[in-house]
Amino acid sequence: MKKHKLLIISHGSTLNGAERALFETIKALSLRGYELYALFPYEGPIIEMCLPFLKKHYITNEVEPWWLCRKKLTFLHKIKRFFVLLKNIWINYKYIKLIDPDIVITNTLTTPCAAIGSKFAQKKHIWYLHELGDEDHGFHFLLGKRFSLRMVNSLSQSVFLNSYFLDSKFKRCIEQNKRSVVYQSVEFTSTIPSNKAKENSLRLILSGRFAPGKGQLDAIKALNILKQNNENITLTLIGSGEDSYSSQVREYIKKNSLEEHVELVNFAKNTSPYYSRANVALVCSRCEAFGRITIEAMKMGVVVIASDTGANTELIRDNFNGILYQYGNIEDLAKKIILTKDSKLRERLSEQANKWANDTFNLEKYSYKLDSEIKRVLELPL
């Protein structure tokens, strides 16, 4: 029986959330017998993880240009960006013709190059979306949001979305018969300490790149309220850097004498040792398209307190598998943290969340869903 060839396009080679999702996609599809190829922009740690499951991989040595921008571009900069996009569309087209896959899969909203290249090469294309772009990361759409999403629709036989929240956001621009919610497997295996939920002291963790939209400063402000009330609680923040927001966080810590209560950690390839020490995870984001960190925390037996925005309300049923607080309300966040001092509450939430997360997000379900959706696309006309 002929193996169907799939080409998966990555916009990065690091270990960020989208790349980790790409690895899980490749692993899940390998279980279904597909012949897998991948295209990466440069060398990086995600490639080594993917290699055992790939027939072959290619490196373009060209940073994949985005049609999302951190700030609005001038007319001249837009023209320059268009030329870079055209160059990379040509590069993607050449690799698509070389590999001759049955389907091309783009793993991110941030770049259209493989989708357009697939159109010229007359190949079926799936767009797997993991982000909103604007509401979660604060990006601007080079061609405008509505027009860009219309292009996503027209350049794809199918569009996968990683949450029902994301599906609801894009339903006006992407046809219903093309959209399909496909939950990732979120593989995160590590031993859960047997006494984690029963510990008396609170050790908080917030993991993710430092950015205003991720709410690290809100977490520290809540901790400061608790410190003033003589609560002995610690917080580990993973993902700090040398950017202006990280500097702002450090200044607040110093100004409020929180050095003994806050641990700052730069990017960590393996966060499980930090989660194994924590018993409460904070998700203070302005808007999560999915919430990979939420599921990872649940699988580690860590109780999640999350803002009541975005996909957080899809993943968390308040007081069942986590706790929700009003986004932007620092005092409400502090109150919800205090609630988790109750070890019996933590134990109940932890057990329920761990079971729900492992039942809902696993490799077997993910592999089956991907396989059924790809088989459907294979039957569609070009």
Image: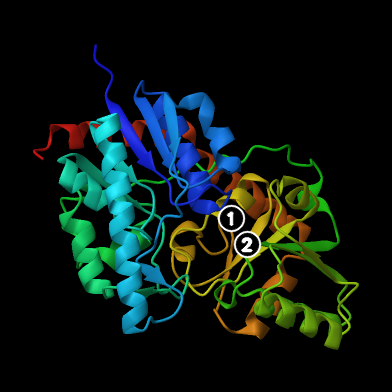
x and y, in percent, of residue 36 in the image: 38, 28
Quadrant hosting residue 324? bottom right
Determine the residue positioned at 71% across, 49% down. Answer: 271
Mark 1 or 2 closer to N-term? 2
Give the residue at x 86% y 78%: 258
> What is the spatial separation of the Cα atoms under label 1 and label 2, in whole angstroms?
8 Å
Residue under numbered circle 1 = 293
Local crowd size for mark 2, using a 10 Å CA cut-off: few (<14), some (14–19), many (≥20): many
Q: Residue at x 47, y 72 (%)?
A: 309
Tell me the amino acid under the disc marked 1: Ile
Front residue (pair 349, 308):
308
Q: Which residue is mark 2?
A: 208
Callout 2: helix, strand or loop? loop
Vertically, is 140 above or below 97? below
Please indicate whether residue 214 sits to the left or right of residue 240 in the image.
left
Q: Are marks 1 and 2 in contact (CB under 8 Å)?
A: yes
Q: Quadrant of the N terminus?
A: top left
Please report the residue visible at 56 percent of the width from the left and 53 percent of the height from the top.
16
Mark 1 nearby-residue class (10 Å; few <14, some 14–19, many ≥20): some
